[in-house]
Image (cartoon, helix red, strand yellow):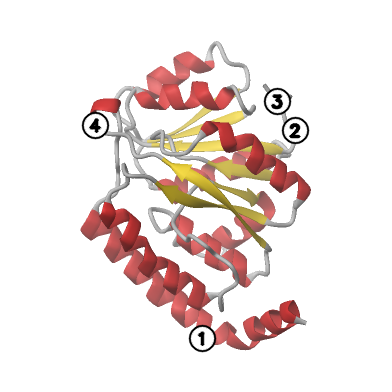
């Protein structure tokens, strides 16, 4: 296992993921410490399981929301707590077993080598991935790249990422949005607007079946409506930023 980091924290938001979240945390602890888990109003008993695990894991901290507030809100709570403790970077990882724990160290190493950048996982899907999720994300990816003049976002929705905490706090403090499922695509666009460099790295993804304990909080109609409204807002933000984005784009090509 790696030594305990004083700068880079693993942050895992969790909502009603059941017992599988304990397996995810145990696997992650083998590759990185410390870990913060933000329990976002879960009522399935997973919070109690995590608190029991934290009693035997000194580098695992469990924070709780009394009610469900959304993924972005959970991450926001986590990065504020991390910043208060002096951490400078955070890797966000899903609690449902989709993201590979054995790549945590690789992502963190890239961040240490490029501290000003955001390290974005680029998902490599296998046959377990629902076709609607694989193909549907292409629409959001197109708009995210248009809104940033193709700054280099290979996947706008994938949540396995390392962020510089200071920059992420700034963009979240600037908007009242990005608090739910819209968190991942909105903050990556806003960070690109701020000129935060982007490094993409391939990450294999596995969707667990219900028999394996897999849980999905994605709701097709609700979340696609949320993403549509988000991209409308971001497009208008993009319009007023075109001169600056063009200037940055031309500088990068020179």
Q: Secondary structure at mark 2?
A: loop
Q: Secondary structure at mark 4?
A: helix
Question: Residue at label 3?
Answer: 2
- Seen as rendered, the residue at the extreme top is 56
Q: Earlier in the sequence, mark 2 or mark 4?
A: 2
Q: Which mark is residue 6?
A: 2
Q: Secondary structure at mark 3?
A: loop
* CB atoms of marks 3 and 2 within 8 Å: no
Q: Secondary structure at mark 1?
A: helix
Instruction: Determine whether, in the image, residue 21 is placed left or right of residue 247.
Output: left
Question: Residue at label 4?
Answer: 210
Front of the two marks 1 and 4: 4
Instruction: Determine whether, in the image, residue 159 is placed left or right of residue 32.
Output: left
Front of the two marks 2 and 4: 4
Res 237 seen here: yes
Q: Earlier in the sequence, mark 3 or mark 1?
A: 3
Residue in front for this viewpoint, 211 or 58: 211
In the rendering, at what x and y percent does residue 106 appear?
Answer: 65, 39
CA gap, disc 1 and disc 4? 43 Å
CA gap, disc 3 and disc 1? 45 Å
């Amino acid at each position: 296992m790696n030594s305990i980091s004083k700068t880079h924290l693993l942050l895992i938001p969790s909502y009603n993921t059941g017992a599988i979240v304990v397996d995810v945390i145990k696997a992650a602890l083998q590759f990185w410490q410390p870990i913060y888990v933000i329990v976002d109003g879960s009522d399935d008993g997973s919070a109690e399981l995590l608190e029991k695990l934290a009693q035997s894991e000194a580098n695992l901290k469990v924070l709780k929301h009394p009610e469900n507030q959304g993924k972005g809100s959970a991450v926001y709570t986590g990065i504020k707590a991390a910043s208060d403790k002096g951490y400078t970077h955070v890797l966000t990882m899903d609690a449902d077993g989709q993201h590979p724990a054995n790549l945590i160290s690789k992502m963190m190493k890239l961040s240490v080598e490029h501290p000003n950048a955001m390290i974005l996982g680029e998902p490599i899907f296998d046959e377990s991935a629902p076709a609607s999720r694989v193909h549907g994300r292409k629409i959001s990816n197109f708009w995210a790249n248009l809104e940033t003049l193709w700054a280099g976002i290979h996947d706008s929705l994938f949540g396995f990422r390392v962020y510089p905490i200071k920059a992420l706090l700034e963009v979240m403090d600037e908007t009242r949005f990005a608090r739910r499922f819209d968190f991942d695509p909105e903050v990556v666009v806003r960070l690109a607007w701020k000129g935060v460099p982007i490094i993409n790295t391939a990450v294999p993804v596995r969707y667990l079946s219900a028999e394996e304990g897999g849980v999905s909080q994605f709701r097709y109609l609700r979340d696609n409506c949320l993403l549509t409204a988000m991209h409308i807002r971001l497009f208008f933000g993009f319009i007023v930023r075109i001169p600056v984005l063009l200037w940055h784009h031309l500088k990068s090509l020179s």
